[in-house]
Image: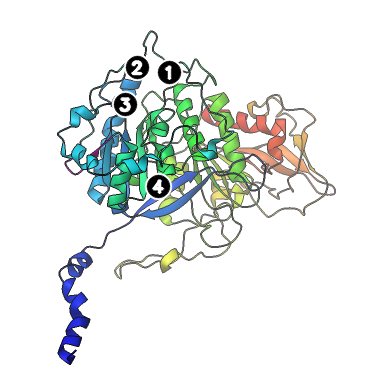
Amino acid sequence: MGKANFIFQLLLPAILFSNVLPAQSKVKEEAFTVSLQKRPPSGEEQGAFIISHEVQQWLPSQTAIIICDMWDRHWCTGATQRVGEMAPYINEVIAAGRQKGMLIVHAPSDCMDYYKDHPGRKLAQKYEKKKYNQLLGEGLLDSEKGAEWPIDQSDEGCEDVGETPHKAWTKQHDAIEISKEDAISDSGAELAGLFKARGIRNVILTGVHTNMCVIGRSFGLRNMVRLGMNVALLRDLTDVMYNSKMWPYVSHFTGNSLMAEYIEKYVCPSIVSTDFTARKQFRFSHDQRPIIAFLTAEGEYRANQKLPEFGRQLLLKENMNCEYATGLPLMEGPGRHNLENMQILADADLAVIFIRRIALEPEKMALIKDFVNRGKPVLGIRTASHAFDAKGNVPREGGGIAASTEKVSGFLEQWPEFDSLALGGNYQGHYPHLEESTLIHIVPGMEGHPILKNIPAEGFASKNWLYKNAPLRSPHAQVLLTGTIPNEKPEPVLWINSSGKNRVVYTSLGHWDDWKTEAVQKIFVQAIHYLLNPQ
């Protein structure tokens, strides 16, 4: 081979791909962020679950959104009305996803003949499906074996008297736009072939109903898991078929919450529409349950387990909608200065804060300050007294790079004054860990307070080591409980701080064993009611 031919052979790959590489390099695909809410098993207590949020970066070209059974009409009137309410919001989500470059899949089951000439239907039919059927299945995933189904749907779930199942639909709801580049299919095997051809790895399910079609269709959550997809439920844009006259005898919307919780425990994580719209998450207009926002990030007292357990009792027994913003349950280490799912503060009626020494990005800290400044009620638990005092500057991740014309701090924001300004406290550390329990006493004259209803007059014992808070810094603070240990003066353990703007309850109770004490459980429930319904 001559020298010229040898050089030509070396350059041949570059010559062949010279018309491809520049075009590809011109546009760099931008990933988008999702915050996946999960409820994995607790590593601390057998049979218990924790709640957490995992942040992931997804490429739009590797992501699909499936819209399940959002029919033009359902056989159940109530279901039809709720579908109609959700449809415009789902359309907003898929429009944002489509603009980013995601594949949108419309899956109105039993309606494929209506779309037989649509390019989206022909797109889905292109792909060989027989080889994928063996990967699909029916029934429970292995992860669901032994789990209790959260609601009784044996009556088909309609609350409207006299209505019985029948095919009432012909197409997808008209409020949901179908674009020419979208796909239309109600076949999991078809979509498996399409996703394989497109390199789809991430799948989001929205639509109805989570306890039936969304989880169980051939293209539903379970089968997306079986196909090895990174799958998530869009939990605020879905609904259940559940009749509140059936077990567990809760409101329809609480049934919806229970089903989302089940999916997060046993099937897959969930996300909310805020990740697409940057707006408040969707809520049904008839869902009038008070919204409790639980904010937790601490690594000492199992708050990421105990708060969801408490929230579940509020959900089942008090008909309260409980939402969670979480950070890593760490005392030290990278990534612990963060809270995810903070949009829940936008329309929350009350915030429960159980956080220990974290700093936050200014925009996230601003959400907490805004909540307090709007006069919203707050329940602070134990480490809330030093929730936002990180004891030293915390650098921003990435070094806080900003435009040269701007002055931006290189550090995350703290709010050490939260203790004195919002809670009215005066946290100065705690007494040593002792073998003896802390004895909790009712302040004389406070026995009849609503927060202390049916609490034993002799008080109770707590495993907590006693916090030092005396003297309190708010002139408006009213102490209800004190705690004592041998050879030390009493310390305030629970108080109300009513400054005229906010109503705040703080307690240094919150050890994981406290939640087993009936008196403590009553105090927390009654504190929630007191804050929501000032008298």
Q: Which mark is residue 76?
A: 2
Residue 330: x, y in percent?
Answer: 59, 56
Amino acid on which disc 3 is placed:
Val
Most extreme residue toward the right, as rendered?
Answer: 487
**With respect to residue 115, does 298 lie above or below?**
below
Residue 32: x, y in percent?
Answer: 33, 53
Between the residue at mark 3 and the residue at mark 2, the CA separation in whole angstroms equals 11 Å
Question: What span is in magenta?
Answer: 178-185
Q: Which mark is residue 83?
A: 3
Of labels 4 and 2, the one closer to you: 4
Element marked by disc 4: loop
Q: For the residue carrying disc 3, how many other residues have a C-alpha within 10 Å: few (<14), some (14-19), or many (20+)? A: many
Of labels 3 and 1, the one closer to you: 1
Q: Earlier in the sequence, mark 4 or mark 2?
A: 2
Residue for badge 4: 229
Of labels 3 and 2, the one closer to you: 2
Q: Which mark is residue 289?
A: none
Q: Earlier in the sequence, mark 4 or mark 3?
A: 3
Residue for badge 1: 156
